[in-house]
Image (cartoon, rainbow, N blue to C red):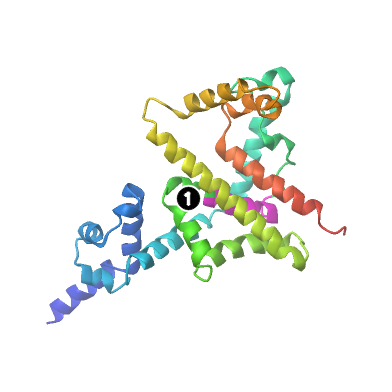
Amino acid sequence: MATRTRRSQRRTEALSRERIVEAAIELLDAAGESGLTFRALTERLATGPGAIYWHVANKGELLGAATDAVVAAALAIEPAEAAGLAESAEAAEAPKAAGPAESAGPAESAGPAEAIEPAESAGSPQDGIRAVALGLFDAIEEHPWLASQLMTQLSHSLWETVAPRIFESVGRQIRALGVPESSWFAATSALMHYILGAAGQNATNAASARTLGPEVDRARFLDAASTAWEQLDPDDYPFTRAVAGQLRGHDDREQFLAGVDLILSGITASLPAR
């Protein structure tokens, strides 16, 4: 009897809610939302459905738990790491400002990060926001199913854990910047919408590129798009033609971070004088 009890305890400990969520994330990464079924989950965990239902009630709850777990891990990136990534991006862009003739080719294209001030000292509110942004960007890129789940939760379940978790992570840094309380919601919402929207679009682009087949890589795709822009009617699309060379060979992650910094520059510029 005692032996059976010990075995039962070991099995309960092994099949924890955390292990079920971990397995669900593995299935989602491998096959998307359609691949997450309780049958596939029981096979992966080598258990029965009853043991799983003891921890999660249904697929919706499981999707929410998986989303929350990935977001929580994404928000754990250190601000100092984000500062280093921002400085590396700026250092990589600096030599590209040597002359206008250098902006035509893939390696010479000037990114928007050139217009951004250097990163503040590690641990600043700006670095905290960059850490949140980069953590979510990388998580959405690593887990293709995450973008749609975030949109679903933000649209229908604002009271669940995910939306407040992200809003709190950004909002604390907005408050630390010295933004007036009357602008906390607007500033935090602007950053949150940009971060999730741009990261989600990047993930969509990556998913679309994968459907083109292995013979069409990112560089070739961007080169084709850039060439098409260069051939647009100069009277109707003068601006698009002018930046066509920058499309070719740009870095999605650096461009994403540059957008975060542009919003931060606007927020800090509007702060009341001290």
The quadrant in which residue 243 appears is top right
Q: Residue at x 19, y 61 (%)?
A: 46
The residue most toward the right is: 273
Is residue 73 left or right of 106 when viewed as pictured?
A: left
Above-or-below relation of 132 to 2: above
Q: Quadrant of the C terminus?
A: bottom right
Above-or-below relation of 223 to 206: above
Residue 43 percent coordinates (x, y): 20, 58
Label 1, residues with CA under 10 Å away: few <14, some 14-19, many ≥20: many
Is residue 73 left or right of 13 when viewed as pictured?
A: right
Q: Residue at x 54, y 64 (%)?
A: 163
Three-letter amino acid code at disc 1?
A: Ala
Q: Quadrant of the N terminus?
A: bottom left
Determine whether the residue tagged by mark 1 lies in a helix, strand or loop.
helix
Report which residue position mark 1 lands on.
139
Q: Which residues are magenta?
A: 122-136
Q: Is residue 66 magenta?
A: no
SS majority, magenta: helix
Residue 118 percent coordinates (x, y): 72, 41
Is residue 160 left or right of 18 when viewed as pictured?
A: right
The residue most toward the top is: 101
Q: Is residue 126 magenta?
A: yes
Q: Residue at x 71, y 23 (%)?
A: 235
Residue 217 percent coordinates (x, y): 43, 28
Above-or-below relation of 95 to 197: above
**Along the line of sight, the residue nearer the viewer: 21 or 4:** 21
**Along the line of sight, the residue nearer the viewer: 43 or 81:** 43
The quadrant in which residue 208 appears is top left
